[in-house]
């Protein structure tokens, strides 16, 4: 029996490679999102600590310059948190894009694998027919030889 070789195997391999690349890109986007979220949590924690410090400092009678400095730092942290929230939203958008891209690549790969599978089935069906025809021919020849 001859070995089957799919003529469009390179395309199937390319589609599989594209899917793998999309998986890596999604993984990287998810990692970036987690990093951004972790960074946002750290900034929020630092802001909460500074507000506590400001509240404690106000009740202790700390010099005005120091209170202003703490307040200025709180304003700085709030602006960084706003920017970090934008970064998180952007990272979430990238994750969503990556999921869509991966979904498309998976569908594309599945279509090509299904096409390959159908081509293999057609090849095997053809081989079985050829085999059956050869067996029928041999049986006919034997029958004719036995009839003589």
Image (spheres, rainbow, N blue to C red):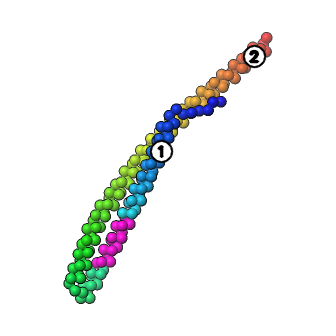
Q: Residues within 10 Å of mark 2 (few under 14, many from 20)?
A: few
Q: Judge by depth and name the residue closer to the eye, 23 or 92.
A: 23
Asked where in the image residue 92 lies, by quadrant, the reply is bottom left
- Helix, strand or loop at label 1? It is helix
Spot the residue most to the left: 64
Majority secondary structure of magenta residues: helix
Question: Which of marks 1 and 2 precedes in the sequence?
Answer: 1
Question: In the rendered image, which quarter contains the N terminus?
Answer: top right
Residue 3, visible in the rendered structure: yes
Q: Let me know if residue 49 is in the magenta part.
A: yes
Query: Residue visible at 62% across and 25% down?
Result: 129
In front: label 2 or label 1? 1
The range drawn in magenta is 37-51
Query: Residue visible at 79% across and 11% down?
Result: 148
Query: Residue visible at 39% across and 59% down?
Result: 32
The residue singled out by tag 1 in the image is 17
Q: Let me know if residue 2 is in the magenta part.
A: no
- The answer to the question of whether label 2 and label 1 lie on touching residues, with beta carbons closer than 8 A, is no
Query: Residue visible at 44% across and 48% down?
Result: 21
Q: Residues within 10 Å of mark 1 (few under 14, many from 20)?
A: some
In the rendered image of this protein, does residue 47 appear above or below residue 84?
below
């Amino acid at each position: 029996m001859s070995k089957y070789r799919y003529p469009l195997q390179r395309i199937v391999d390319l589609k599989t490679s594209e899917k793998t690349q999309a998986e890596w890109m999604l993984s990287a986007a998810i990692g970036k999102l987690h990093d951004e979220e972790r960074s946002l949590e750290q900034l929020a924690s630092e802001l909460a600590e500074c507000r506590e410090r400001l509240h404690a400092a106000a009740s202790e009678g700390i010099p005005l310059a120091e209170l202003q400095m703490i307040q200025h730092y709180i304003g700085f942290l709030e602006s960084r948190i706003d920017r970090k929230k934008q970064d998180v939203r952007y990272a979430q958008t990238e994750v969503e894009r990556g999921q869509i891209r991966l979904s498309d690549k998976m569908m594309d790969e599945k279509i090509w694998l299904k096409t390959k599978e159908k081509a293999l089935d057609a090849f095997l069906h053809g081989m079985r027919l050829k085999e059956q025809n050869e067996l029928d021919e041999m049986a006919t020849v034997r029958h004719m030889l036995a009839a003589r």
